[in-house]
Amino acid sequence: QVQLVESGGGVVQPGRSLRLSCAASGFMFSGYGMHWVRQTPGKGLEWVALIWYDASNKKSAETVKGRFTISRDNSKNTLYLQMNSLRVEDTAIYYCARDNGDYGGALDYWGQGTLVTVSS
Amino acid sequence: QSALTQPPSASGSPGQSVTISCTGTSSDIGTYDYVSWYQQHPGKAPKLMIYEVTKRPSGVPDRFSASKSGNTASLTVSGLQAEDEADYYCSSYAGSNNVLFGGGTKLTVL
């Protein structure tokens, strides 16, 4: 069965960096686009970034552009999110999710999320 | 791009139907037939309920249906059940590989 497991979250000071990972299994990872979506505790969902199946296309939300970088290693079935220059407002649960294949934003499988807390 | 607009709350009694709206613009919902709906129970990850405006993934009950008119999409839950109580989020493709989410609607089953 499809499984997505995020890791790498934790407490970090403003201005520092953190790298999240998402280990995928149960499907052909190299054939699917992948997304990062975040959710501030008690608040709504915010799309963060997308990477195509072969990494030929990437896109980030304006709120993280220039600070966050999405990448993937298809040989390791792993998705990454490099987060630099972190801000207090980046505090959230970060989910990785699989695109259903149309690149129309339908995310058919989600991980359990990893909590990132940015605080001094 | 701004988030899509959803009512913060909706409610209905068991067996009734409830409809949740999601308003966007001509740059997202109004242009693309890529509207999705997600259900999220407390402490859980979101679950895809509807994609491409009206399609249901395998395993989603047919009590869940959706539509779109102009810049507004709608999710209808018929025959409300206690387990339908959750937060519901809409999303839309917004062009150039961008995705927008709505602010979410808390559905209460009375």
Image (spheres, coloured by chain):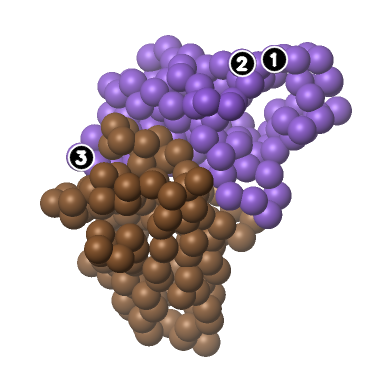
Chain colours: A brown, B purple
**Residue B78: image tag:** 1
Q: Residues within 10 Å of mark 3 (few under 14, many from 20)?
A: few
Q: Say if labels 3 and 1 share a chain.
A: yes
A98 in relation to B81, above or below? below
Identify the residue at image location x=41%, y=63%. Answer: A22
Of marks 3 and 2, the one in the foreground: 2
The Cα atoms of the two marked residues, 3 and 1, are separated by 35 Å
Is A117 displayed left or right of A104 in the figure?
right
Q: Secondary structure at mark 1?
A: loop
Whole-percent x, y for residue A95 in the image: 48, 57
- The spot of residue A15 in percent (x, y) is 37, 83
Name the residue rendered at 34%, 63% in the picture. Answer: A78
Q: Chain of mark 1?
A: B
Q: Earlier in the sequence, mark 3 or mark 1?
A: 1
x and y percent of residue B36 in the render? 45, 30
Pointers 3 and 2 in contact (C-beta within 8 Å): no
Q: Which residue is mark 2?
A: B62
**Which residue in the protein does label 3 denote?**
B96
Query: Which chain's residue wears label 2?
Result: B
